[in-house]
Image (cartoon, rainbow, N blue to C red):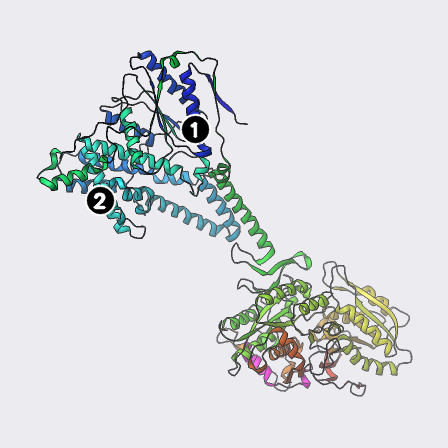
C-alpha cells in the first residue's frame, strides 16, 4: 500500500473539481498516457474582483503542494521581466537550467535538456559577439559567433564549474557507478595478473579517463552524432532559415557534410537571436517558440520508449508546470501561446502538463499576428524577390495558427462564483507517493552498479576457482584439458593434456638426460615437441598421438620424473624422424598428457585425453601409461569405450591384454618375466637339497595405487613354488612416514635371523628400494656370509648401484629387462638419436660420443625407457598412416594387429597373430645377472629373446654356472 504524503481539505467546489481533474490526468498517465492539455482556470464572471482571482490562484498553489512530495516532477513558475518576451523566455530557461522541485528521491534521475543547452550556448555566443564595440558585417558576425561557440565547446558555460581533475576524482569515488566498476575491475585484475601489472593498468585507466574527460570538456568529439546536434540539423522549424544546407545534408556517415549543416543552422539561429535582442518581433516569436520546441523535445526524449535505460517504464507521471498567475505582462500568456503553437505544428505528443490561473478580466487568446510586409532592414531588396525572402524569414513563425483560430491545446476551466465561494470543507483531498516501477529496481544506476560489481566479483571468484581448478585458467581462453589435482604429499599437480601453450608440465624442470643426452633438460625436450607441432601447417595431413606418462613429481626430488623424461625423449625422437623424412607426407603431432607422480592420476588424465580426442579427429591413439597401478584397468577401459587404441611402453601387467582389446603392450608381462627367471630358479633348486625361499614385498599403503609390487608378489610366489622352492615366509616392508626410504631393518632381521636362512629371495618392491636391500643383506648377521640369490622384475633395469651396496659380495641378482637391445637391429638409431638431441643444445655445444661396440649400453638407452617409447610411437604411427594416408582412431586400432616393424632396436615390433582378449606373446625379454651389486658391479645377459620372437625360452637357453 502506498504511503500518504499530503492531506488537506477543499476550500470550495472549484478547488475539489480542479484537484481531481489534475490528479486523474497525472495518475492515469501510467495506464494509457492521456494527452496532456494546457489547463487554464479562470473565474467565469469577468467582473469578479481580486478576491475571486485570489481564490483561483490558491487552487493552483494547492494542487502544486499536493504533488510536491509524491515523486511527481513539478515546477512553480513566477513570471517577470522587462518585456513579456523576456519574461516568457526566462521561464523557459528556468525549466531547462534549474532543478525541478521533485524533492527527496524521484522516480528516475533528473531531466536532461541537451537541446536547450545547445540553444543556450548559441545565445551565449551571440550575446558575447553582439556586445563587442567593434561592428561586424552579417557574415563576419556569423563567423565570430561560430568561433565563440567553438571556444565554448558548443556547450553553455555553468557557474562554479570544477576542473577536469576534480571531475575525474569525483567520478572514480567508490560510491559512484564508475568508481564501483573501476574498483571491481581492479580487484579482478589483481587476482588475474598480479599487483604490478594491476598498478600499471590502473594508472593507464586513470590516464585514459583523464584524456577522455579532457577531450569531452575541451572539444566536441563526435558532435554531429549527439542527439542535440542531430535535432538542430534535422528539425523542420529551421529548414526555412538555412535553405543553403537542408536537413537531408546531415548523415551519420558524413561528419564534414553534417558539420556544414549544423554550422549553417547555428548561424541562422544566432542571427535570429541577435535580431530578437534588437527588438525584432518576428525574431522574438521565432526565438521563444524554438526554445519551447527544444524544451518539449527534451521532455519527450526523457519519456522515450525503447531506450536502453527503460526510462519510459520508470517515469509513470508527467512533468507538471504551475503558473499561479498568467498575464500578458508577466509572459505567462505568451508562454502558453508558444507551447500551443509548437504543439500545433508538431506531430509528437509531449508529456508536459500545465496548470495556470488567468485573472477574470483577461482574455486568453492567440498572440496577435505579425505583419507580413517586408521588414525595414530588408536593405536593397525589392519586388518579388524581396517578398520571397521575407516569406522565407517569416515561415518559421508563420506556420503557427492564426489569431482567429482557437487555442487547440488550451483546456479552459471557467469557474463560477458559486463554485469558488461555496464552502467544501468536508471534502478531504489526499495524495499518495507515486510508486517506483519494477524497471527502476531492475535498471537503476545503483542496481546496475551492484549487479556489475557482483558480476565482476563473481567473475573474480570464478577466476580464482578456475585458477585453482585448471592449470591455465584466466578469465578468457582458459584450457579445461588440464586440471590441478592433489598429488602425493598434498601438493597440486597439473593433470591432463597440454593443449594450451601456457600449460607446460616440465616448465622449470632442469632434470637432464643421462649418457650422451647429458645437458638436455626435461624442459628442453618438451619445448622441442612443441616446436615440431608448430612446424606442421594447418592444411598439412597429419595424425596426432597422445603421450601419457608421469611428467611431474615432487618438488624436492626431480628424479621422480626420470621415467617421463626418458619416455618423452623416445617419443620426440620418432616424431623428429617422421617429420624430417622427406618421403613421409603425413606428419606426426604429439600431445603430452600427465598422469601425475608415479602415474597415480592416470584415470583423470585419460578422461581429458578422451575429451580432446572427441574435439580433434586427428587423435589416433595413446602411447605410454607405462606404470601398472590400480587405475590402469579402468583407464584402459575408458580408452576402449572411446575407441582409442593404447600402445603401452613398460606396463608389465599380465591381465590388461586379456581384458581389453584396445591394449597393445610392448613390455613382457610379469608372468613372462617370472617364467624366464624361473628357468634359473629351477636350476638353482635342483642343486639344493631343501631349497628355501622368501618373498619380500612392499606393503601397499592406504593411498598407494601401485599394482606392480602386488602382482610381482603373486607371480614370485607362484614361480618359486613351481620351481621347487619351499616358501618359508612372505614378508612385507613399509616406507617411512614421509614416504621416502624403505624400512627394511625389521623384515631383514626376521629373514636373516631365522633358523634356516633362505637360499633365494624374490623381491617384489621398487627399484628405489634395491640399494637399501643390498646394503641390508650385506650387513645383517645370517645373510652377510651366505650366498643368496635375489630374483626380481623389470623395475631393476633402472637401478644404479652406489657405495652403500659394496658389502653384498655374495648376493647375485637376476631380473628381467624389457628392452633386449643386444638382440635387435637398428644400430643407426643410437647415433641418429645422439645427433637429434645435440641439436637441442645451445649452439656450439656437443654431446659425447657413443660406445662404439655396444652403443645401447650408454646410460641414455640402458634402462630401455627411451627405446620402448620410441618403438611404441613408431608402431602407432605406422598403423595410423597405411598407404601414406592418415587414418582414424578406429582404423588405427584395427591396423595395429597387422603392424610389423623390422630392424627395430629390440627386434621386430609386431602384433601379427595376436587376437583380442588373449596374451600377446610377441614381447622381447632379457634375463640379466648382476654380481657384486656395488660400484664395481658386473652384469651380463644370461638369456633372452628379441621382440617378435615367439620361441619360448628353455633351461638350456638360460644356463648359469
Q: Quadrant of the C terminus?
A: bottom right
Q: Quadrant of the N terminus?
A: top right
Q: Position of residue 443 (x, y in %)?
A: 48, 40
Q: Position of residue 803 (x, y in %)?
A: 71, 72
> Is residue 822 on the magenta stretch?
yes
Residue ID at (72%, 68%): 633
Residue 94 in the figure: left or right of residue 714 = left
Badge 2 marks a residue whose secondary structure is: helix
Q: Quadrant of residue 10?
A: top left
Q: Nearer the viewer, residue 488 or 520?
A: 488
> Which residue in the protein does label 2 denote?
264
Q: Quadrant of residue 87?
A: top left
Span shown in magenta: 817-837
Q: Position of residue 145 (x, y in %)?
A: 20, 40
Q: Quadrant of residue 57?
A: top left
- Say if residue 809 shows up in the picture: no
Q: CA distance from mark 2 to mark 1?
A: 41 Å
Residue 620 in the figure: left or right of residue 809 = left
> Which residue in the protein does label 1 denote?
26
Majority secondary structure of magenta residues: helix
Residue 306 in the figure: left or right of residue 492 = left
Q: Position of residue 487 (x, y in %)?
A: 67, 59
Decide: is 275 above or below 819.
above
Amino acid at each position: 500500500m502506498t504511503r500518504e504524503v499530503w492531506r488537506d481539505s477543499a476550500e470550495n467546489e472549484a478547488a475539489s473539481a480542479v484537484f481531481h481533474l489534475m490528479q486523474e490526468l497525472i495518475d492515469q498517465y501510467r495506464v494509457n498516457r492521456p494527452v496532456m492539455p494546457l489547463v487554464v482556470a479562470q473565474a467565469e464572471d469577468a467582473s469578479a474582483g481580486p478576491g475571486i482571482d485570489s481564490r483561483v490562484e490558491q487552487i493552483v498553489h494547492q494542487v502544486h503542494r499536493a504533488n510536491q512530495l509524491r515523486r511527481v516532477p513539478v515546477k512553480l513558475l513566477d513570471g517577470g521581466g522587462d518585456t513579456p518576451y523576456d519574461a516568457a523566455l526566462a521561464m523557459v530557461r528556468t525549466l531547462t537550467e534549474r532543478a525541478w522541485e521533485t524533492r527527496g528521491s524521484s522516480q528516475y534521475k533528473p531531466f536532461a535538456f541537451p537541446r536547450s543547452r545547445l540553444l543556450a550556448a548559441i545565445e551565449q555566443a551571440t550575446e558575447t559577439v553582439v556586445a563587442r564595440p567593434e561592428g561586424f558585417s552579417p557574415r563576419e558576425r556569423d563567423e565570430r559567433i561560430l568561433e565563440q561557440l567553438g571556444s565554448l565547446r558548443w556547450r553553455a558555460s555553468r557557474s562554479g564549474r570544477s576542473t577536469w581533475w576534480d571531475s575525474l576524482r569525483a567520478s572514480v569515488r567508490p560510491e559512484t557507478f564508475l568508481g564501483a566498476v573501476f574498483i571491481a575491475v581492479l580487484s579482478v585484475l589483481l587476482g588475474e595478473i598480479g599487483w604490478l601489472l594491476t598498478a600499471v593498468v590502473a594508472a593507464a585507466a586513470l590516464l585514459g579517463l583523464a584524456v577522455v574527460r579532457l577531450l569531452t570538456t575541451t572539444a566536441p568529439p563526435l558532435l554531429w552524432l549527439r542527439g542535440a546536434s542531430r535535432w538542430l540539423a534535422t528539425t523542420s522549424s529551421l529548414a526555412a532559415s538555412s535553405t543553403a544546407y537542408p536537413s537531408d545534408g546531415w548523415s551519420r556517415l558524413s561528419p564534414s557534410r553534417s558539420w556544414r549543416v549544423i554550422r549553417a543552422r547555428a548561424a541562422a539561429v544566432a542571427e535570429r537571436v541577435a535580431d530578437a535582442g534588437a527588438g525584432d518581433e518576428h525574431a522574438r516569436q521565432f526565438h521563444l517558440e524554438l526554445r519551447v520546441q527544444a524544451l518539449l523535445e527534451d521532455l519527450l526524449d526523457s519519456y522515450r520508449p525503447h531506450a536502453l535505460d527503460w526510462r519510459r517504464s520508470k517515469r509513470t507521471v508527467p512533468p507538471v508546470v504551475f503558473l499561479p498567475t498568467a498575464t500578458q505582462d508577466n509572459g505567462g500568456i505568451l508562454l502558453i501561446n508558444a507551447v500551443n503553437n509548437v504543439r500545433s505544428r508538431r506531430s509528437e505528443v509531449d508529456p508536459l502538463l500545465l496548470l495556470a490561473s488567468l485573472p477574470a478580466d483577461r482574455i486568453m487568446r492567440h498572440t496577435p499576428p505579425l505583419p507580413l510586409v517586408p521588414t525595414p532592414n530588408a536593405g536593397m531588396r525589392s519586388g518579388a524577390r524581396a517578398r520571397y525572402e521575407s516569406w522565407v524569414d517569416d515561415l518559421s513563425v508563420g506556420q503557427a495558427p492564426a489569431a482567429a483560430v482557437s487555442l487547440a491545446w488550451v483546456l479552459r476551466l471557467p469557474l463560477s462564483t458559486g463554485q469558488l465561494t461555496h464552502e467544501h470543507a468536508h471534502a478531504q483531498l489526499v495524495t499518495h507517493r507515486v510508486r517506483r516501477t519494477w524497471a527502476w529496481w531492475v535498471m537503476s544506476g545503483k542496481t546496475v552498479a551492484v549487479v556489475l560489481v557482483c558480476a565482476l566479483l563473481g567473475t573474480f571468484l570464478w577466476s580464482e576457482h578456475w585458477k585453482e581448478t585448471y592449470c591455465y585458467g584466466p578469465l578468457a581462453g582458459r584450457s579445461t584439458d588440464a586440471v590441478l589435482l592433489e598429488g602425493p604429499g598434498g601438493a597440486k599437480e597439473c593433470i591432463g593434456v597440454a593443449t594450451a601453450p601456457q600449460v607446460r608440465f616440465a616448465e622449470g624442470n632442469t632434470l637432464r638426460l643421462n649418457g650422451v643426452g647429458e645437458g638436455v633438460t626435461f624442459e628442453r625436450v618438451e619445448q622441442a615437441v612443441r616446436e615440431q607441432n608448430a612446424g606442421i601447417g594447418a592444411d598439412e595431413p597429419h595424425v596426432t598421438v597422445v603421450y601419457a606418462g608421469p611428467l611431474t613429481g615432487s618438488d624436492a626430488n626431480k628424479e621422480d620424473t626420470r621415467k617421463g623424461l626418458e619416455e618423452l625423449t623416445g617419443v620426440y625422437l620418432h616424431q623428429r624422424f617422421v617429420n624430417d623424412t622427406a618421403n613421409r607426407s603425413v606428419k606426426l603431432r604429439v600431445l603430452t598428457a600427465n598422469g601425475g607422480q608415479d602415474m597415480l592420476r592416470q584415470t583423470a588424465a585419460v578422461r581429458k585425453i578422451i575429451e580432446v580426442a572427441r574435439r580433434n579427429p586427428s587423435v589416433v591413439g595413446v602411447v605410454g601409461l607405462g606404470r601398472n597401478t590400480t587405475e590402469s584397468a579402468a583407464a584402459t577401459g575408458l580408452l576402449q569405450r572411446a575407441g582409442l587404441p593404447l600402445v603401452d611402453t613398460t606396463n608389465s601387467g599380465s591381465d590388461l591384454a586379456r581384458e581389453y582389446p584396445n591394449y597393445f603392450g610392448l613390455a613382457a608381462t610379469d608372468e613372462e618375466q617370472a617364467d624366464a627367471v624361473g628357468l634359473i630358479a629351477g636350476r638353482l633348486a635342483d642343486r639344493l637339497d631343501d631349497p628355501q625361499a622368501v618373498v619380500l614385498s612392499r606393503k601397499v599403503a592406504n593411498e598407494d595405487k601401485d599394482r606392480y609390487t602386488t602382482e610381482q608378489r603373486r607371480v614370485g610366489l607362484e614361480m618359486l613354488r613351481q620351481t621347487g622352492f619351499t616358501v618359508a615366509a612372505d614378508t612385507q616392508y613399509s616406507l617411512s612416514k614421509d614416504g621416502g626410504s624403505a624400512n627394511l631393518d625389521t623384515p631383514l632381521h626376521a629373514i636373516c635371523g631365522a633358523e634356516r636362512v633362505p637360499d633365494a629371495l624374490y623381491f617384489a618392491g621398487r627399484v628405489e628400494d634395491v640399494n637399501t636391500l643390498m646394503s641390508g643383506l650385506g650387513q645383517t648377521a645370517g645373510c652377510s656370509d651366505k650366498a643368496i640369490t635375489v630374483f626380481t622384475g623389470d623395475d631393476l633395469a633402472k637401478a644404479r648401484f652406489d657405495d652403500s651396496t659394496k658389502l653384498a659380495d655374495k648376493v647375485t641378482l637376476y631380473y628381467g629387462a624389457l628392452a633386449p637391445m643386444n638382440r635387435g637391429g637398428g644400430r643407426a638409431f643410437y647415433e641418429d638419436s645422439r645427433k637429434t638431441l645435440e641439436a637441442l643444445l645451445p649452439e656450439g655445444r656437443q654431446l659425447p660420443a657413443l660406445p662404439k661396440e655396444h652403443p645401447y649400453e650408454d646410460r641414455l638407452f640402458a634402462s630401455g625407457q627411451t627405446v620402448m617409447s620410441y618403438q611404441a610411437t613408431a608402431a602407432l604411427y605406422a598403423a595410423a598412416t597405411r598407404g601414406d594416408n592418415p587414418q582414424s582412431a578406429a582404423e588405427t586400432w584395427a591396423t595395429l594387429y597387422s603392424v610389423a616393424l623390422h630392424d627395430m632396436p629390440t627386434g621386430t615390433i609386431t602384433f601379427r597373430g595376436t587376437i583380442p582378449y588373449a596374451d600377446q606373446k610377441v614381447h622381447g625379454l632379457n634375463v640379466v645377472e648382476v654380481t657384486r651389486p656395488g660400484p664395481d658391479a658386473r652384469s651380463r645377459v644370461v638369456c633372452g629373446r628379441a621382440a617378435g620372437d615367439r620361441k619360448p625360452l628353455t633351461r638350456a637357453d638360460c644356463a648359469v654356472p
